[in-house]
Amino acid sequence: MQIKNSFIFQLSQYIKPMIIFYSIILAITVVPCFFIFSSEPVTVMTVSGWDFAGLIFLFVIGCVTTNEGFPVHLQNSVSRKSYFIGKILSVTVVSAIMTIMYTFILQLLFETAFLGSKVFQVESILNLIYFETDKPTIKSTLWSSAVLFVLSLFINMLGVFFSGIYYRVGTIIKVTISAGIPLLFLLFLPLIDSLFFGGSLYSTIFEFLGNIFGVIEHAPWKGCLSFGILFVVTTIISWFVYRRMSIKK
Amino acid sequence: MSIEIKNLTKKFGNVTALDNVSLNFENNKIYGLLGRNGAGKSTLLNIITNRVFKTSGEILIDNENNEENDKAISKIYLMSEKTLYPQDMKIKDVFKWSKRFYPDFDTKRAYELSKLFDLNTNKKVKALSTGFTSIFKLIVALCVNTPYVFLDEPVLGLDANNRELFYKLLIEKYSKEPFTVVISTHLIEEISSFIENAIIIDNGKIVVNTTTEELLQSGYSISGKISDVDNYISDKEIIGEDTFGGLKTAYVMGRPDADISENLEVTSIDLQKLFVKLTNTREVK
Amino acid sequence: MIINAEIDKPIFQQIKEGIEDAILSGAFPEESQIPSITEISVNYKINPATALKGINLLVENNIVYKKRGVGMFVCEGAVNKLMENRKNDFYDKFVSSLVLEAKRLKISENDIKNMIERGFKDEH
């Protein structure tokens, strides 16, 4: 019973940010397209990165829900177990909604609406990565949507994981994590790489990642599988962060 | 049906917040959980409701272990000093969610009480003053209808009128349908008239756990000339003494002797004084 | 009626005596309804169990009686009964302590009699 209640509560935490997110997307891309379409019928408009914007959004939302969501569950006599199961359910449902919104509303609907005049095109990054084509087919669209869904689950849960860590640690560690991780990957490792490995470290990493996520072989099922495993692993690790969580003093 | 606490110990690092605490909260009684700031009252309530994990010991809510047990902890509503509701939540939404998580929550009554206390339910949690923050949490506590209601410093920031109103509402609800109430406070005189049992906690230990009636009769004060008083108390357990010029007042445990000399005056000790004396001695020693 | 948790007398005793006073003064005439346990406990911020204990003393002494589902009422003849009881208590409660204090202050028996006469006159 409390699992269901917690799920509904956590889902409600996503609703307002999602409305804001889609309002912004509409405001900055779709609305200007209509405007251009009506005045200059020959202009071709390519919109790219909506799928990745959604992923960043899911990560950020995952990062901020615990601070307010967890204490209110304690106040309402919900165990951590029920809260966490509610969390997994809400992450799944929100990832599904975001994927459906992207694939069926933004991509398919708008594409179909404008396909005849070839003026408006939604470019899927995943489609490009896995199929290397700017002419997506139904099959490629569905496959990249499947990857997008599993990737969303993983990214959202990663946010939940960091959110739990942030809740448990003090300000100093919080800042260290926030600044440290980007610095490590964007500054420190590239520096080491170019100094000692002549760039081969990063190319090896990318090759490895390209392999396990099926990018090189153009095998989206590999992407689904690998991101799925990452999602499960992140979920398990996150549970260890959440299972003994207390209210802050 | 009761809450049983057996040999409960809680350590925060090297600090022992609760030291081998054992006590019961029986059904349908009003308890006063009394202690100075930092005595361990909030920690005890937080552990019973599993907001914080214990270090060792056992807690049973109606014979069920409380840890990670929705069914057990749902029987308790703890109104804590700290506000755990999201800052952006409106009070009417607090009521709405309370109804979802506690099915016996009486929404209609919550709005009635909001009117009575002049609380604007369209306001967000963060927009409320300290007094109104206490009020909205008290309203939830009075409408939640769980078998156990814990109130941690319930009247924080409330003016005298609202305090009076809250106490009356609490007693009214209790006398219509009894439930277990635990009021944690250091303002003893305000609740001494209606708490049935008093538990005094000091430095993480239970110092007193008895009925209010017994506690009031457990000690008395005796005053007179220093020599007379000293003579009288020589063979008695005293919990404190004040001297003022040549006069001395001693606070003595037990009942006064039958044959007290006319030079000595015996008076009862009120709960507040007893509490101060009982929780002070530990520090002096 | 004033209830004070901090004086020597237990609260239930204060409740009992408070209602007796009210009956004697005519505030609660015989066969009239007295406040319920809830009303008493809410009004004086006392535990209902304590209020019940006080009321039960009155029931035992046949000062008030319970009508099931209706409430509590003052017994017929309660006023006379209370007066009798109070008269019996009068000597212990007032006269002996008066004499004790008078002795301490060295006030003579005659002086006291005069004072009592003066007291009765001032009443009028």
Image (cartoon, helix red, strand yellow):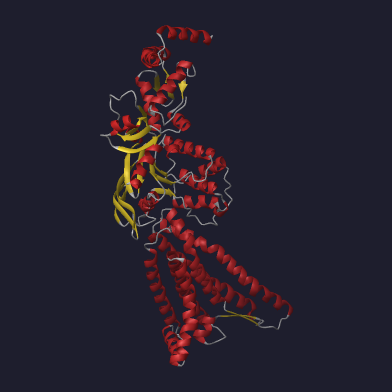
Q: Residue at x 49, y 55 (%)?
A: B85
Above/below status of A83 relative to B210: below
The image shows residue B99 at horizontal and vertical percentages of: 48, 50
* Residue B247 seen: yes
The image shows residue B34 at horizontal and vertical percentages of: 39, 43
Furthest toward the bottom, the residue is A198
The image shows residue A157 at horizontal and vertical percentages of: 45, 70
Above/below status of A42 relative to A95: below
Q: Residue at x 47, y 53 (%)?
A: B82
The image shows residue B161 at horizontal and vertical percentages of: 54, 38
- A46 vs B230, left or right, is right
* Residue B2 seen: no
Furthest toward the right, the residue is A39
Q: Residue at x 47, y 77 (%)?
A: A181
- C46 vs B228, left or right, is right
Q: How many marks?
A: 0
- Between A98 and B203, the one nearer to me in the picture: B203
- Between B10 and C69, the one nearer to me in the picture: B10
Q: If the image is split into quadrants, where does the C terminus of chain C sit? A: top right
- Between B175 and A32, the one nearer to me in the picture: B175
Above/below status of C77 relative to A151: above
- Between A27 and B244, the one nearer to me in the picture: B244
The quadrant holding residue A1 is bottom left
- A117 vs A107, left or right, is right
